[in-house]
Image (cartoon, rainbow, N blue to C red):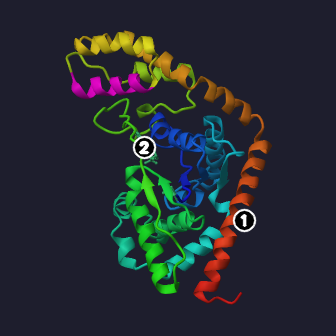
Amino acid sequence: MKKNIIVSGIQPSGELHIGNYLGALRNFVKLQEDGYECTFFIADLHSMTIDYDPKEKARQTMNLALDYLAAGLDPEKSTIYVQSQVPVCTELAWIFNTVTPLAELERMTQFKDKSQKHTQNINMGLLDYPVLMAADILIYKATTIPVGQDQFQHVELTRKIARYFNNRFGQTFEEPKEVITPTPKIMSLIDPSKKMSKSHGPKSYIAINDSPEVIENKIKKAVSATTYDEDVYDFYATLLEEFGSAKNQEYFTAQFKDKGIKFSELKKALAEDISEYFRIFREKRAELEENPEQVIDILRRGAEKADIKAQETMREVIKKVGLLN
Ligand code: ADP
Ligand code: TRP
């Protein structure tokens, strides 16, 4: 059997919320603990395709690094780095640009969505985004890509890019597969018909680094229902299932069955359970935050490790495409 090589990344564009945690970071940690060869990076170059404040970006990148490490990603087990610190990936992306038909990029649903949403800044990077993603993946000859549903189309295009390259220059890349660990979708605190998302503002989500007081406050202000409302009930049932203590799960599940929830009681218990769930995370994160040099060092060494493998692939590519070497 061939070994699974796992690669994935998250963009540094704001705080991670509990939906991102369940949908992405928790799976990363699990894959690492299952013993796979894992590379997890911070996709800062991808995050530049949407308007951003240059004064904020480095801090956002550090914050995501703190989240990665405090959640349990371990530089002894996984390669952890910042995308812009392994620039050879962008070199491979350029070469992939030359084999990728423009029409393939123009039909990506994320490109269409984002160019509709950000009409003032439809930049080339937004269009080219999946090609850089293909380079991030193929440069490590990755086999398995844990991503959310919204990224499936990009992994599919990565397979096509591997094929386009292989057809033009000879067999070089295997086709990777996306994997999704079934995770519940967490809905917005203020509108349980929408998914919890950074883009709906901090009142709509619980950040994994929120303090117990903030969690309590946000949940206090979150949706309630005076009569039975399926969306509201499902919203709390999901949170309870993921973060509730065994005792609270049993107690409130019985209430759910009777459709007779006492929201003030449920909210108080849930806020405490979510705070407790992330307590060790917060402690570790605060400790790391005190030692930014240590984090920067971890990222630098991660980039060095990633670069060794990336350069190896790049040497092969340079030969195959016929550049002077
Ligand atoms: P956001 O909408 O907050 O910007 P992203 O779209 O950047 O989040 O998603 C990053 C990752 O988090 C993806 O893997 C996605 O599947 C997961 N994710 C995002 N929102 C949720 C949610 N509400 N519930 C579960 N997983 C989510
Ligand atoms: N585009 C991904 C996202 O926003 C992040 C990403 C960039 C990625 N390169 C990747 C994910 C390579 C997996 C593999 O979620």
Name the foreground residue: 307 vs 52.
Answer: 307
Q: Residue at x 58, y 49 (%)?
A: 36
Residue 10 x/y as whole percent = 54, 50
Residue type, label 2? Thr
Q: Quadrant of the C terminus?
A: bottom right
The residue positioned farthest toward the front in the image shown: 1
Mark 2 surroundings: few (<14), some (14-19) or many (≥20) residues within 10 A: few
Q: Residue at x 64, y 88 (%)?
A: 323
Name the foreground residue: 241 vs 83.
Answer: 241
Q: Earlier in the sequence, mark 1 or mark 2?
A: 2
**Helix, strand or loop for disc 1:** helix
Whether residue 15 is visible to the viewer of this picture, yes or no, is no
Q: Is most of the magenta stretch helix, strand or loop?
A: helix
**Which contiguous range is marked in magenta?**
229-242
Q: Which mark is residue 79?
A: none
Q: Is residue 179 magenta?
A: no
Mark 1 surroundings: few (<14), some (14-19) or many (≥20) residues within 10 A: few
* Left or right of 46 in this view: 151: left
Residue 13 x/y as whole percent = 54, 49
Residue type, label 1? Ile
